[in-house]
Amino acid sequence: MIRRTMLEWETIGYGDGPDAIPLYAADRIAAVAATSPLAGRNGEGVLEHGRKGLRARGVVGVIAANGCALEILPKIDFPDAEGEKATGRIRKRLVHMLAVALDIRIDAGRMTALDWQRDTLLEILIRLFSEKLLDAVRQGMPRRYLEHAEDLPVLRGRLDVTRQFSILAAEPVRLACRHDALSADIALNRIMKAVVSRLVCIARTGDNQRRLRELAFAYADIAEVPVAALRWDQVVLDRTNSRWRELHQLARLLLGDRFQTTSDGRSDGFSLLFEMNTLFEEYVARMLKRALVDEGLRIVSQGGRLFCLETEDQRGLFQTRPDILVKRGDTVVQVIDTKWKRIAARIDNLKQGVSQTDVYQMIAYGRLYSCDRLTLLYPHHAALGPSAGVLAAHKVTASDHRLETATIDVAASHDLMRSLRELTVDANAPVSN
């Protein structure tokens, strides 16, 4: 099995060495990547299949084909770690971001037990899912009362009068019964079985394979439904089965639009991919909600939805959806737009590599939402110095609005909440009379 790991926006050359990838393996992996919904129209939104190597873009995850796999990790700086140690920390941080974005709790003991330096991201996610599911199944599968229709020699439940006096009119010895029966063959369990069936074909580590085989046996009596036909809308999650909520989220991750197969269900080709721009946005929004829980500020993600233009008959055009609105009551006090890209150090570029389009967009947000504080938020990196925070703030011409560029260090989990509070609470504190 050929396995390679690279960082986003980096290139891995063709060859047989440990820092290269054989051409035939690159061809297979590029073909799988091109089938992803994240690949775009030209098929190179995930990987650029160049003459000299494969270049990753702003999508991370795992792409596997027959006999080979490529893991793409985000660029997150850990100054005190190199090589496999740094790679392990990046995997751990990426799983943390996914857990926060999907509202999944991973206890400290389970995080410590994972082999971050050796296992790929996919094997780590399979282990987390299979361990959680095995624990839940041992406590009992969820069951619900389902309505059944059967023709029986004695009455059970209530009589289906229409069927009795039409279909069974010539068979008085049978009764058309309709009754409720407690069953485990429900939508939630069918989804879990679909995930187990998929992962059995993909898992490579012995422990993962053992757990998945045990789970496959436990779900043997549950109907097998194709992934496209699963009834997600019929899943009922309430206080009686709340421990399944996180498993439901993990199942969506592993069977959702970002998880694709390019074969008949075996392991010839698959991908588990995440767009870092989207993940970063959701991660920051959820961490902000945690940081500001007692501060009198409210976070609205992908909200607002005001229109830039209006027709003469008052129909809106070009609806806006700012990444994050910080509100006090009904007033927007800050607009934050997240960007997963490396901002330039100011000494090298006074504009810091900020896109002109992003600046125009933020100015429009300030006007539409009557907000004076506008923030473009980027991930911190080592070239910017040791401390994250506001890098620059500029007055928007002919207005009271200020546009600032700021960073947060996603590698420094212990300082992240404090950094987010400093970016919002201190600048948006109410003014006393």
Image (tube, grey):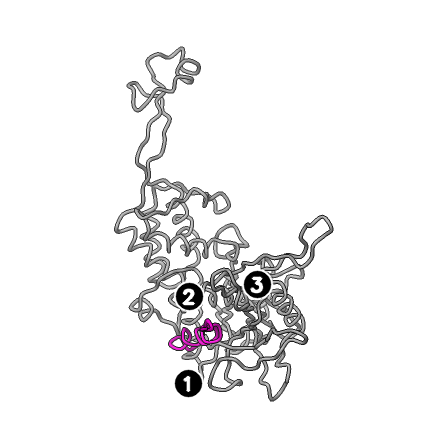
SS state under label 2: loop
Q: Is residue 279 left or right of residue 213?
A: right
Label 2 Cα neighbours within 10 Å, binned few <14 / some 14-19 / many ≥20: few
Which residue is more in the foreground, 327 or 355?
327
**Residue 308, percent across and down?**
66, 59
State the separation of the CA atoms marked 3 and 1: 36 Å
Q: In this figure, which residue is indicated by the disc labeled 1?
A: 80
Q: Which residue is mark 3?
A: 322
* Residue contact between numbered discs 3 and 1, judged by CB atoms under 8 Å: no
**Residue 37: image location, x then y, percent:** 58, 57
Q: Which residues are magenta?
A: 411-433
Element under disc 3: loop
- Camera-side mark, 1 or 2: 2
Q: Residue farthest to the left?
A: 139
Amino acid bearing label 1: Asp
**How far, Cα to Cα, is label 1 from label 2?**
37 Å
* Residue 68 higher or lower than 389, as above or below: above
Q: Residues within 10 Å of mark 3 (few under 14, many from 20)?
A: many
> What kind of secondary structure does the magenta stretch mostly adopt?
helix
- At 46% across and 77% down in the image, what residue appears? 409
Q: Is residue 349 left or right of residue 86?
A: right
Q: Which residue is tagged 2? A: 296
Mark nearer the N terminus (3 vs 2) = 2
